[in-house]
Amino acid sequence: MCGRLNVTDSPGVRALCEQLEIDFWPDEGMRFARFVRATERVTIILEHQGRRLARNAVWWLLLEPDHSAPVMRFKPSRYTSFNTRYDKLNVPRSAGYQAFRQHRCIIPVAGFGESQKTGSQMCYHDMTVEPGQQLAMGGLYREWHGHDSHGNVFVETSCSVVTLPPHPKLRQIHQKSTPLMLSPEDNSLQRWLDAGITEPAVLGDLLIPVIRHDLLVQPINKPSLYQPVGESFVIHAD
């Protein structure tokens, strides 16, 4: 499972956003952070009516009204949904079923992190691409409509990262799954983002795990401290 995202202000992230010719950006600008956790906000890119839009979304696909707040707002649901498994995308009534067909998005990133328990010890690894490389996670988004204290309608956006079966090259880092990694160089990113594609079978080949960029892997003690605990190494692209 993909548990944290690295969205530093890298040349690759900038170049990808420029290449996509995004028409609208969120008022508060793009969210940059080396360590984005689930339930935090992250910038996604989606396509709507032929236009590319950027939004800051809650990284947790299922939201629910927060009735404890004085002003209406949404909070992450009790159901874990920061990732959406590939084998749930075609299950009717699952959280990602309609989103897979109508609301796909990408998340431009400089890298991502994984954790895995080995015996009684938790091991953490951070993976990044070369600064100029254009990496994006394939995701889903949903919209949640509410009313503020003045009766005005507002929209909250949520998102998840699609996870695939484990990749052999990543088994030492995470044995259960692999995030959907996309690239503009092989057209995988453009296909996933294309809102005109609504037939799931057309995207079936993207649900096979592929490493599309070389990944620099750094073992760390924990994500919050980010201290190396071993030699870095490279996992080469397929």
Image: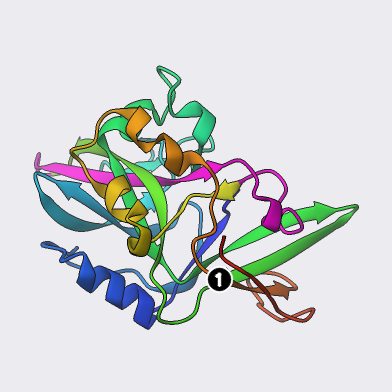
| Residue closer to the observer: 23 or 182 | 182
Image point 35% across, 82% down: which residue? Answer: 11
Give the residue type at disc 1. Answer: Asp
Image point 55% across, 42% down: which residue? Answer: 164
| Residue closer to the observer: 78 or 10 | 10
Element class at badge 1: loop
Part of the protein shown in magenta:
150-177
Q: Is residue 4 above or below residue 10?
A: above
Image point 54% across, 73% down: which residue? Answer: 128
- Residue 153, how many percent across, how many down? 12, 40
Q: Quadrant of residue 67?
A: top left
Residue bearing mark 1: 214
Q: Left or right: where does residue 235 sit relative to residue 83?
A: right
Q: Is residue 87 above or below residue 148?
A: above
- Residue 115, how many percent across, how many down? 70, 57
Q: Is residue 65 visible?
A: no
